[in-house]
Amino acid sequence: MENYKKIIEDIYLDVKNVNDIGKVANYIPELAFVDSNSFGINITTINKESFGIGDFNTKFSIQSVSKVLSLTLAYKFEGAKLWERVDVEPSGNPFNSLLQLEADLGKPRNPFINSGAIVICDVLLSHLENPKEDFLEFCREVSNIPTLEYNEKVAQSEKSSGFRNTALCNFIKSFGNIKNDVDAVLDFYFHMCSLEMTCKELSEIVLYLADDNFTTHKGKRILTMSQAKRVNAILLTCGFYDESGEFAFRVGLPGKSGVGGGIVAIHPDKYCIAVWSPKLNVKGNSYKGMLFLEKFTSKTASSIF
Ligand code: DON
């Protein structure tokens, strides 16, 4: 940890001073109120050693990073049958694209683009009695953080402006790949995306993907080793939409981004690291977040390759 700490401090100061060419997301109006200069990092090793710097203890909207948790819960329920509803191929298209769905007959390319995450929400709706409460409870149990919450303002803000997601959900339903009521699926999806966490919490909640022996405080496993390997594989190939290749090329870790400016990356058998900087590049990924992680895995020589 001492080694990581010094490197993180140095890169933090370096990247903090870089001119940020990104822009804060404003298509969800509530997200635009964030302090755009926020910048935080937290690393948690599989031995639970933790180090944070900058705004690592400030809550932010994790948005699409929540898709890792919803996929995990749906995979627990369905096992390999899940892949009949959603594929595991990179899309090479923006996260909110409708383009491929027509040719693919309503089967989304992967669970991390919006269409795929909406199908995953539909799967969860079929399994959970109180979807919003039960999913939140699952996140609290995985992280052992009982205070995790949705941000109702962000959820309502996205609901009132989520025209593309509404189109996606209806379009997929026309192919029969949404089983529940469209409004109920979208309400759950918008709440899931509104989950708030700090960098510290985010780096802790995905430890089950880094540590083969991970169990919750109640002694429960989250995924089998084989399932965790597969989720990491989808993260590496699809976690950054049409910039997934670029992230693998520059950073070399499985990871997931969100339009709130958060990124979490996983080094299997070593650590999880979360970075938050709200200004996004044109692909919707945190500009400084990617830059920081590129420098971090280069200086620590700790990518998976
Ligand atoms: O559905 C949306 O557009 C947002 N709730 C989440 C998108 C997102 O985070 C994409 N990430 N880079």
Image (cartoon, rainbow, N blue to C red):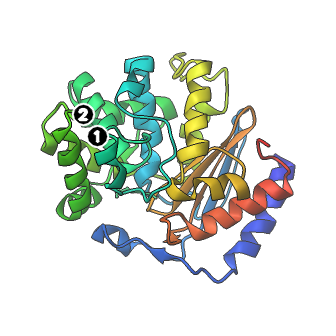
Number of residues whose C-alpha sits closer than 10 Å to that of mark 1, classed few (under 14), some (14–19) or many (20 or more): many
Helix, strand or loop at label 1? It is loop
Q: Position of residue 80 (x, y in %)?
A: 45, 19
Q: Residue most toward the front?
A: 103
CA gap, disc 1 and disc 2: 6 Å
* Quadrant (top left, top right, bottom left, bottom right) of the N terminus: top right
Judged left or right of residue 266, residue 110 is left
Q: Which residue is mark 2?
A: 177
**Residue displayed at 53% across by 22% down:** 223
Looking at the picture, tell me which residue is in the foreground, 148 or 254: 254
Amino acid on which the number 2 mark rests in the picture: Asn
Indicate the position of residue 160 as horizontal and vertical percent values. Answer: 17, 63
Q: Is residue 299 above or below residue 208?
A: below
Q: Residue furthest bottom?
A: 19
> In the image, residue 149 lies at what x, y percent?
35, 46
| Numbered disc 2: secondary structure | loop
Q: Quadrant of the C terminus?
A: top right
Determine which quarter of the picture holds residue 297: bottom right
Q: Does 18 appear above or below 134?
A: below
Q: Nearer the viewer, residue 119 or 28?
A: 119
- Residue indicated by mark 1: 106
Hey, what amino acid is under mark 1?
Gly
First-in-chain label (1 vs 2): 1
